[in-house]
Image (tube, rainbow, N blue to C red):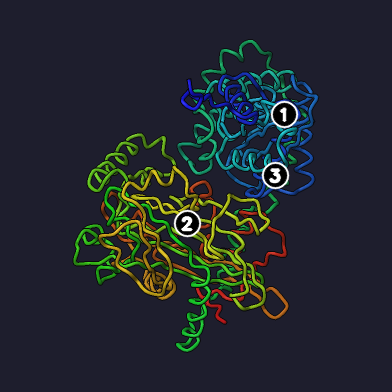
């Protein structure tokens, strides 16, 4: 038989075999992190989590909590590793432990405890999580340990430091170490009670502290909100622990230890609270802030002309895939129908009287070293799930998710949509300057937005580590998916072509807005529209016919170039329209660029990818200080050329 006709066996490369083996090992519970790996993961997670914590750096109180913690560690079943205990300057009653010996306790726990036994009970519970390696188990089960890391050769042996750091950051962002199973919490309570008893404390103090938490839940819910988000109810814990406590011997409180506890509480009462200090600082910043300056007509016209030259230089080529309803995949302008209402775009998009001419919105920013050009593609419809069916299913999905409200503490069920009115997704092109002439600048990197996820790309010449990027000279080639319109890099592969059931339209900047109606698999000329004079100006009015929601952006702090110095300034951005007015499928589901956010970074300020592009890119790519974040041009903050 002709060998060409025989079925060919596809062999997995060695890397593929390793990845598959690692995945199977993780899925079936065959492997756990080594102690060395657990400690390193905990250290990196501690580094990440401390970025968002305000630690209480008071030596006497810190020494007290560390001495108490170490006394408990000494009688634990895992006392050969090093433990660190840190105080968090927060009045909320909460504590948590990270893998490998890292324990954090809020000052609110000390303030709420009636005696040292209760405080020791909280510490013993967190130590117990480390003794039982609950955090390490959570890390393995999270699915965030990359294939080939840990299971095959060791986390540190196979993974680069940046890879492991990124993994730890992802685990922190996902809350992997902040919530354990009920079984793990029950086990930690029992191990903690044993530690308390063996260290000479009264283990029944755990029950009395649970009772205190239950009372606070009724009378001061804000004080224990985070605690109850990550632990079972105190009533359930008391019931589970009571029978076990009968096997332990109660210990009388030590007079010496009681003195140390009282001394620590009295010192805490003299220390300022982080919440109060933060409020005072915020008020001082707000008092010093100024609204963005307005440019006179001539200055604005001159700056917009240069903006257009820069945006035209790097204008992307958009490969728009056409789905089952090609017309609704046409890229156009928000006011294609002659008005700035957002709640009639769904219907008007289907009206052939309104041509969907090709436009792309843009905004330009400059620092000492780089140009930042935001591009945004607008579609009147996001029609995932079909034109009518998608909108109806969206309503049903949200209703279903909301029925289980206790499982949706962030309110994200409002985003559970398959189709909605208006759709604005974007790309950020960063170019490295060579002087002030944009025609000498080189393409440096690109980030895109695909449904609240930022994707990172770098051309081969940049020297950066990002996914590959195809470009025509300095113009990135981007792919826009059909129906949902998320933007990613153009790969020209089978997965992208398979989505284009009705072919492609290739949008190319040509300084004119062409109507693509009735054609496919051809180039379409597009025109550029400044975001500053369109969406931004209308957003200053808050809620209106264009915007269905508004957001108070408060004061935004940025650095500006001033001669040879970089000067920090506080800009009063205030209330702005933050979601486009649209009702089909879900109210106000599309956002302008300053309403965009990364789904996994909800603690970050809304819209910072657009409003603070230099700072955001530098953080995303971990760029050195030579990558300037001092703006020489930022029209949205009133800095003009």
Nearer to the camera, 286 or 9 = 9
On residue 162, which mark appears? Answer: 3
Whether tag 1 and tag 3 are in contact, CB under 8 A, the answer is no
Give the residue at mark 2: 478
Element at label 1: loop
Give residue 614's quadrant in the image. bottom right
Q: Percent position (x, y) of residue 73?
A: 76, 26
Give the residue at mark 1: 154
Q: Earlier in the sequence, mark 2 or mark 3?
A: 3
Q: Percent position (x, y) of residue 46?
A: 69, 41
Nearer the observer, disc 2 or disc 1? 2
Furthest residue toward front? 1
Which residue is painted at 45% across and 59% down in the image? 426
Q: Percent position (x, y) of residue 419?
A: 31, 48
Note whether residue 544 is visible.
no
Q: Percent position (x, y) of residue 92?
A: 57, 43
Which residue is painted at 63% across and 78% down in the image? 436
Judge the density around disc 1: few (<14), some (14-19), many (≥20) Cα neighbours within 10 Å. some
Whether tag 2 and tag 3 are in contact, CB under 8 A, the answer is no
How far is the residue under mark 1 from the one under mark 3?
A: 15 Å
Q: Earlier in the sequence, mark 2 or mark 1?
A: 1
Q: Earlier in the sequence, mark 1 or mark 3?
A: 1
How far is the residue under mark 2 from the one under mark 3?
A: 27 Å
Element at label 2: strand
Furthest residue toward top? 247
The quarter of the image holding the C terminus is bottom right
């Amino acid at each position: 038989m002709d060998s060409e006709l025989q079925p060919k066996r596809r062999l997995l490369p060695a890397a593929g075999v390793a990845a598959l083996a690692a995945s199977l090992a993780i899925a079936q519970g065959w492997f756990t992190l080594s102690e060395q790996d657990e400690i390193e993961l905990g250290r990196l997670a501690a580094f990440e989590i401390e970025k968002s914590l305000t630690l209480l750096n008071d030596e006497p109180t810190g020494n007290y909590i560390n001495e108490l913690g170490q006394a408990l560690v000494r009688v634990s079943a895992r006392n050969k590793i090093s433990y660190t205990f840190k105080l968090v300057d927060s009045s909320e009653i909460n504590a948590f432990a990270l893998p490998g010996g890292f324990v954090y306790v809020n000052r609110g726990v000390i303030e709420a405890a009636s005696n040292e036994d209760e405080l020791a009970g909280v510490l013993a519970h967190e130590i117990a999580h480390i003794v039982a390696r609950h955090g390490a188990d959570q890390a393995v089960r999270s699915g965030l340990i990359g294939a080939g890391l840990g299971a095959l050769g060791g986390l540190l042996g196979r993974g680069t430091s940046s890879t492991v750091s990124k993994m730890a950051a992802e685990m922190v962002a996902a809350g992997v170490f902040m919530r354990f199973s009920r079984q793990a919490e029950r086990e930690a309570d029992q191990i903690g009670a044993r530690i308390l008893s063996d260290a000479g404390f009264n283990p029944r103090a755990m029950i009395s502290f649970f009772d205190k938490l239950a009372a606070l839940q009724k009378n001061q819910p804000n004080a224990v909100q985070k605690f109850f988000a990550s632990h079972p109810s105190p009533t359930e814990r008391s019931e589970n622990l009571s029978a076990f406590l009968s096997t332990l011997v109660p210990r009388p409180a030590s007079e010496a230890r009681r003195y140390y506890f009282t001394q620590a509480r009295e010192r805490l009462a003299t220390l300022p609270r982080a919440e109060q200090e933060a409020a005072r600082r915020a008020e001082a910043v707000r008092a010093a802030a100024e609204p963005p300056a307005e440019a006179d007509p001539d200055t604005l016209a001159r700056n917009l002309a240069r903006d257009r030259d820069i945006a035209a230089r790097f204008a992307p080529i958009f490969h728009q895939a056409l789905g089952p309803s090609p017309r609704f995949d046409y890229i156009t302008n928000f006011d294609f129908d002659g008005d700035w209402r957002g709640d009639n775009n769904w219907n008007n998009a289907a009206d052939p009287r309104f041509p969907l001419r090709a436009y792309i919105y843009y905004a330009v920013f400059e620092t000492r070293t780089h140009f930042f050009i935001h591009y945004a593609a607008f579609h009147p419809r996001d029609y995932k799930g079909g034109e009518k069916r998608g909108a109806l299913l969206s309503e049903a999905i949200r209703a279903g998710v909301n029925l289980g409200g206790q499982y949706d503490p962030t309110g994200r069920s409002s985003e559970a949509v398959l189709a909605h009115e208006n759709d604005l997704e974007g790309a950020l092109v960063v170019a490295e300057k060579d002087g002030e002439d944009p025609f000498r600048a080189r393409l440096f990197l690109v980030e895109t937005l695909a449904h609240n996820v930022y994707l990172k790309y770098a051309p081969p010449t940049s020297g950066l580590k990002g996914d590959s990027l195809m470009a025509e000279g300095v113009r990135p080639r981007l792919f826009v998916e059909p129906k949902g319109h998320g933007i990613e890099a153009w790969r020209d592969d089978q997965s992208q072509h398979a989505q284009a059931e009705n072919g492609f339209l290739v949008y190319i900047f040509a300084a004119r807005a062409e109507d693509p109606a009735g054609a496919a698999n051809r180039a379409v000329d597009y025109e550029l529209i400044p975001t500053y004079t369109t969406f931004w100006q209308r957003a200053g009015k808050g809620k209106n016919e264009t915007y269905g929601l508004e957001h108070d952006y408060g004061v935004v702090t940025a650095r500006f170039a001033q001669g040879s110095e970089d000067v920090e300034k506080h800009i009063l951005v205030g209330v702005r329209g933050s979601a486009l007015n649209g009702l089909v499928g879900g109210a106000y589901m599309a956002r302008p660029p300053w309403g965009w956010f990364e789904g996994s970074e909800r603690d970050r300020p809304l819209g910072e990818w657009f409003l603070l592009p230099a700072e955001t890119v530098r953080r995303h790519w971990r760029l050195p200080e030579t990558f300037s974040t001092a703006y020489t041009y930022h029209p949205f903050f009133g800095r003009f050329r």
